[in-house]
Image (spheres, rainbow, N blue to C red):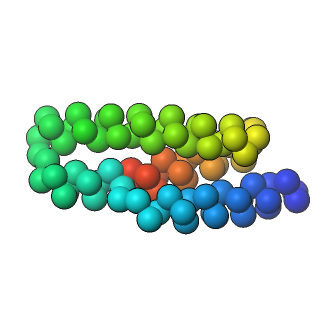
């Protein structure tokens, strides 16, 4: 139980630092993308966010439910969805 609590604490700290960056949605709005360009941009941005969040989870040595929870929240926050 302590391990899960620590994982959630660390994920909250990591995400708060990442929130200083613009989300994918914010960047798409800033670029005034629409249609196919928006779809393509969002897919690439989500893919990049997933890779980055997976690396962050690996760096934190998370596994199982803690890794899944961290990665899901990290990608959601990064993409703005």
Q: Going by the image, does 30 lie left or right of 56?
A: left
Quarter of the figure that contains the N terminus? bottom right
Q: Whole-percent x and y of residue 2?
A: 88, 59
Q: Which of 80 and 10 is in front in this view?
A: 10
For the point 35% across and 40% down, the residue is 45
Residue 65: tell me if it is visible: no
Q: Going by the image, does 33 lie left or right of 46?
A: left
Using the image, determine if residue 10 lies above or below residue 38. Answer: below
For the point 43% across and 52% down, the residue is 78
Using the image, determine if residue 8 lies above or below residue 38. Answer: below
For the point 51% across and 34% down, the residue is 51
Place residue 17 in its image quadrant.
Answer: bottom right
In the picture as drawn, the residue positioned furthest to the right comes out as 2
Place residue 48 in its image quadrant.
Answer: top left
Place residue 5 in its image quadrant.
Answer: bottom right
Using the image, determine if residue 24 lies above or below residue 47. Answer: below
Q: Whole-percent x and y of residue 7?
A: 75, 55
Residue 27: tell me if it is visible: yes
């Amino acid at each position: 139980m302590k391990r899960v609590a620590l994982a959630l604490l660390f994920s909250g700290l990591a995400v708060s630092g990442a929130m200083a960056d613009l989300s994918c949605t914010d960047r798409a709005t800033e670029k005034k993308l629409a249609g196919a360009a928006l779809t393509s941009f969002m897919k690439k941005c989500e893919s990049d966010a997933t890779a980055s969040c997976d690396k962050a989870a690996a760096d934190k040595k998370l596994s199982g439910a803690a890794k899944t929870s961290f990665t899901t929240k990290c990608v959601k926050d990064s993409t703005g969805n």
